[in-house]
Amino acid sequence: MWMLDFIPDAYLHLAIITIICTGGGLYLLGLLMNFWPPAYPYREPVRITATVLVVAGIYFLGGYGVDMEWRAKAEQLQAKIDQASAQSESANAKIQTKIITQTKIIHDKQIVVRKEIQTVEKQIDAECKLDPAVPKILNDAAKNPMANPIGTVSVGVAK
């Protein structure tokens, strides 16, 4: 029951032990009633009540133990989740650094290609003939300067 989560565990354990001890005490009282004749009519109800209290207390103690085991497992799993989250953060930081580095390299490569195109611009436009430098510049621009920068697997065509 969710309402029992608001009660401290020590109080729950104390209440369960109190129920068991009360049942045991009542059972002993029922046995002692055999020696006092005026209490004969009350000994069976006292023994039945004592038995019910002891059984209920043991049942509650078992439920309490299972709940404590589940809480311990939940704490262990939460610790694992926290550890995995920390590892994820560090891995994300590494990936982010690689992405920034790759973006900077690509940007720098684009600037170099633009400057090369500007230097041979007059040769390209001269007679509307394609200069041999143009395909080389465009091929260099199309190349990926960092092959598999993040550790991805490149898929190629089989020859």
Image: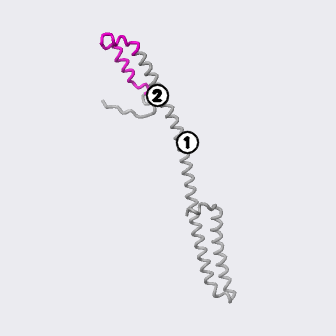
Q: Which of the two discs, 1 and 2, labels the residue nearer the N terminus?
A: 1
Name the residue located 53 percent from the left edge and 47 percent from the top edge.
Answer: 81
> Which image quadrant: the C terminus?
top left
**Magenta highlight range:** 117-146
Q: Residues within 10 Å of mark 2 (few under 14, many from 20)?
A: few
Name the residue located 49 percent from the left edge and 30 percent from the top edge.
Answer: 100
Q: Is residue 38 left or right of residue 129?
A: right
Q: CA distance from mark 1 to mark 2?
A: 26 Å
Q: Residue 49 location in percent, x, y?
A: 61, 78
Instruction: Report the residue marked by disc 2.
Output: 103
In terms of depth relative to the viewer, which is nearer, 71 or 116?
116
Q: Is residue 17 above or below residue 50?
A: above
Q: Is residue 7 above or below residue 143?
A: below
Magenta span includes 141: yes
Q: Residue 121 location in percent, x, y?
A: 37, 13
Q: Is residue 159 left or right of residue 3?
A: left
Amino acid of disc 2: Thr
Instruction: Report the residue marked by disc 1.
Output: 86
Q: Is residue 95 above or below residue 116?
A: below
